[in-house]
Amino acid sequence: MSDLPSSVRALVADASGSESRLEIRSLPTADLGEGDVVIAVSWSSVNFKDGLASRKDGKVARIDPIVPGIDLAGTIVEPGSSDLAVGESVLVHGYDTGVAHHGGYSEYARVPAGWVVPLPAGLTGRQAMTLGTAGFTAALSVIALEEHGLTPDAGPVLVTGATGGVGSVAVSILAARGYKVTAVTGKEDAAEWLHSLGAADVVDRASIGDASRPLRRETWAGAVDCVGGETLAAVLASLSYGAAVAASGNTGGVPVPTTVFPFILRSVSLLGIDSVQCPIERRREVWARLADDLRPPLLDDLATDVVELSGVPEALERILSGGNRGRTLVRLR
Ligand SMILES: NC(=O)c1ccc[n+]([C@@H]2O[C@H](COP(=O)([O-])OP(=O)(O)OC[C@H]3O[C@@H](n4cnc5c(N)ncnc54)[C@H](OP(=O)(O)O)[C@@H]3O)[C@@H](O)[C@H]2O)c1
């Protein structure tokens, strides 16, 4: 038996009142949720979805109260039915974590064995959380584009929402693989940082156009889009013949005002990217690649901020307001 404490310190989002409240509470260990694997959490991170899960109007949390945090990394305290050993380093993200099951903003987590990914060799827990769900989603996007046939000599590749979590990791992975990356950002002062991650060009959001025209000049051999809305429509309109966009997000809006023309006149493809239900075997393979050929060369530079639990509410506000840059780490111990 392990020496689990009877209660754990966690950041709890409580939507029982008229406004949601975020506060650090002492939670009975017995209330950590279903599962038989207990993890001493060392690191978590801040994703856009964590911002939504912490708000009553975010329409993401499916239990109340909830410990948000869709990402966590730490060491095994109780291996349960898994084939993992006490003390082994692991990570967990997605499935119900931080939305319908208590997540990573907690000293300990209890999860089903089928959600756990052993930390791949070459990545520390801190580095795994520097990547987190955002980095995993960027990797899924690059893999999807390459499986569709994208190669560096096909032409420039666009990344939207480039300073954000998904965007910044995508810029970094693509540039390291030899792609000429054009980074799209709404932040005026971000060009130097994006160039340092490997972007060949940095352009303003407005310059890629809007949804007013179904087709624009064929420009991009591929695209990683985590913005959605009009931005995704503009990307579809300017992909080269036969190219694809890997779409994962909606920070810029949910409706995509496009037409059939990019699809039926230019044979472009819209590749849907989902990290949440990605099967565990595939998840483990992608993490192994994130530690290897998809590893961003300046991985530690992507961690732009490190906060304790007390600093998480401010970081969640920042990411919801579109002001995030890179990845914010949450240190639990
Ligand atoms: N499908 C999946 O499995 C999956 C996984 C992870 C994330 N996501 C989704 O992907 C999106 C990004 O997540 P994230 O954690 O990377 O968030 P993030 O760090 O906030 O990055 C999003 C970026 O989008 C840009 N942006 C924000 N508001 C915008 C607006 N109104 N119009 C255009 N651009 C805007 C900003 O970049 P610039 O200022 O540089 O333009 C922002 O930094 C979210 O919608 C998230 O839910 C989906």
Image (cartoon, helix red, strand yellow):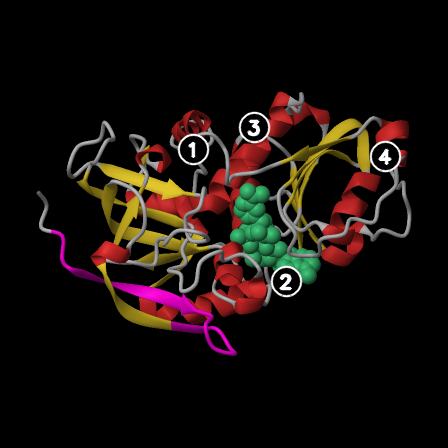
**Ligand 1 within 8 Å, label 2 CB:** yes
Look at the picture and state if 248 lies above or below 285. below
Q: Nearer the viewer, mark 1 or mark 4?
A: 4
Looking at the picture, tell me which residue is in the foreground, 35 or 170.
35
Q: Quadrant of the C terminus?
A: bottom left
The amino acid type, in three-letter code, at marker 2 is Lys
Q: CA distance from mark 4 to mark 2?
A: 28 Å
- Specify which label sits upstream in the sequence, 1 or 2: 2
Q: Give the residue pinned by disc 1.
A: 290
Point out residue 320 in the picture as x, y percentages from the top left corner.
Answer: 56, 64
Q: Say what amino acid the circle numbered 4 marks.
A: Pro
Residue 154 among those drawn in magenta: no
Q: Which residues are magenta?
A: 4-22
The residue at which mark 2 appears reads as 187
**Residue 81: which numbered mark, if any?**
none
Residue at 52% across / 55% down in the picture?
Answer: 49
Q: Nearer the viewer, mark 2 or mark 3?
A: 3
